[in-house]
Amino acid sequence: MAKKKTGPAKDTADEKAHGTGGRRGWRIWRPRAGPVLRFALKWGLVAAIWCVFITLCLAAWFATDLPDLGRLTSIDRKPSVTLLAADGSMIASYGDLYGNQLRLSDMPPYLREAVIATEDRRFYDHFGIDPLGIVRAILIDLRAGRLVQGGSTITQQLAKNIFLTPDRTVRRKGQEVLLALWLEWKFSKDEILALYLNRVYLGAGTYGVDAAARKYFGKPAGKLTIFEAAILAGMLKAPSRANPLSDPQSAAERAHVVLDNMVAAGYLSAEDESRVRQDPGIATFGNDTPPSGQYFADWVLDQVSSYVNFSDRDLVVTTTLDPKLQKLAEAEITTMMNAESTKLGAGQAALVSLDPSGAVRAMVGGRDYRQSQFNRATQAQRQPGSAFKAFVYLAGFEHGFTPDTHLIDGPLQIGGWRPDNYNAKFYGDVSLREAFARSLNSVAVQLSERSGRRSVTEAARRLGITSPLAPDASIALGTSEVNLLELTGAYAAFDNGGNAVWPRGIETISDREGNVLYRRSGDGPGRVMKPRQVVQMLDVMASVVDWGTGTAAKIGRPAAGKTGTSQDFRDAWFIGFTAQLVTGIWFGNDDNKAMDKVTGGTGPARLWKSYMTKALAGQPNRPLPMPNVPAEPVVAAVPAAGSSTTMSGGQSDAASPDLNAIIDRMMQERNNRK
């Protein structure tokens, strides 16, 4: 019987169903899977090639105008000007300031930790680009509905700061990525971080942590505290808005956020953070006053270019400012204006204090520099009122009048103008000493007209008044506008023996290497008053403080000065001096609104007293400097007879005949009363 042929065993139903049987099952599965796999591999490879190609094209496009990589070690910046006070302390700096180039080991560890915790927590883990950071930033921004967090690494920020512009374009971002990769390939992580901390902008013209530490805290970066380091790290996002000078409160708030970041990153324990927050210096940090002497700094900076050219070098300007007197002046104005501004109806005040040689020791141009940079000590032109009478009396004394000369204080008319006294009261027969001390207007007008208005303006010019002066009859009452600095500077001549001075703020200008480019020489034009007139002016001006309108300025040591009040109480002045200092005070409103009956003998005189008492504390009680006067007779001017009862409105260098008649009539009335 023939044997049956045996073939391969038949697949079971399960094997057929699952394709796990013999070769036939295998053949059934392979035709279904093979084309899909080959398709995926083929087009995946094509896509990868195209991605590489596009990436290379983009890289080539980005690289076509990459900046010179040699700029990494070069610094392109504007020259700076640093202003120093008389004691060598810094007042202000302008331009780009760079500190010392520090190694990472030269910086306190918590400084770099504060920066890493806030700016790039994965700095030591990525290759210059942080994909995880980018994804996290996108998710945070989507959740917030606005841009609240960026994905740039410290390496990218360094590339942007050194090589690129801040333009927000795809091309610039691509170049930033390429440069970041190059930096990571070229330098170690510590070197990149050190470069970043030495070059990053931190507001107020400072570049690098060392320059910022010196600018904001007066110390090198190596001596920063943890809180100060947190302030610098917090400024990286908005250096111009959140720095200790422009907004100390925001700077302090940002520092607290940085401290929280340091705890979250493991750089600081919760206990350490609590101790940092309890630092007594932190509680008042946000309430710090703005830097002292900013009005003075602006005034000095405007003059620097008149002496030297600083387009190609850094300059160091040593000034005349006394930091102690400056802070005292600012504190006294702030205290009085905060307490009495509303009651007085005075919105602003200004102060200038200089020594008898004209060196400005303190200058305050307003209540708050942050609110208004307009300098009311140098830029505001205001009517000086009776403070201008000093020049009227000087002209009178130069024409033969003396403090003991008598005139009649009474009703007076020049054309249609009738000068009146502040209290609407006339004193009749008075000496010029009493007329000056009581600030009697009719006597000042008579003296101006007798001496000649031109003589009055010439006297003012000799002593340093440079503002335009209108030669009309009212010049005797200070109706021509002047500024506080020039008026105070003019009074210095009464305090130094009769020498006019040029109020100055600059002593020397040097470059960074110490080469002196300018040195002050001389104080002013020299003698402008004879010794006799100096003594006569000191006589009448001392009477103002002793028993006249300026008694509120008495400070228990020899002093002299003059009050001034303009029409309708729009301006109030007191300009006074001792043997050591000449100080001028002004009260008023920027909109020229009238104050509440404030005169020079009230608020300004009281502020002068408060400032000068503290400024001169501990200094010897010296008499006012009196020059030697030759022993020769002085003939007082004798009024001439006349018959007219009104004055001419025109100007003359000699006495007006009409004025002579009025004086003659007044003298006769005085004799009749006797």
Image (spheres, rainbow, N blue to C red):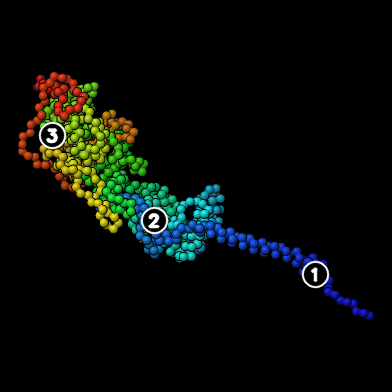
Residue 136 at x, y percent in the picture: 54, 55
Mark 3 element type: helix
Q: Sequence-wise, which precedes: disc 1 or disc 3?
A: 1
- Give the x, y percent position of residue 303: 28, 46
Query: How far is the residue under mark 2 from the one under mark 1?
Result: 78 Å
Q: In the rendered view, does 638 fall on the left or right side of 346?
A: left
Q: Which residue is mark 1?
A: 24
In primary-sequence order, the first of circles 2 and 1 is: 1
Q: Nearer the viewer, mark 3 or mark 2?
A: 2
Q: Which quadrant holds residue 454?
A: top left
Q: Position of residue 250 (x, y in %)?
A: 42, 48
| Secondary structure category for the residue under label 1 | helix
Q: Badge 2: how crowded within 10 Å, few (<14), some, or many (20+)?
A: few
Residue tagged 2: 76
Q: Earlier in the sequence, mark 3 or mark 2?
A: 2
Seen at 22% across and 41% down, the residue is: 489
Question: How far across and how far down the image is residue 550, in percent?
Answer: 20, 35
CA separation, marks 3 and 2? Answer: 61 Å
Residue type at mark 2? Asp
Disc 1 versus disc 3: distance between alpha carbons? 135 Å
* Left or right of residue 467: residue 639: left
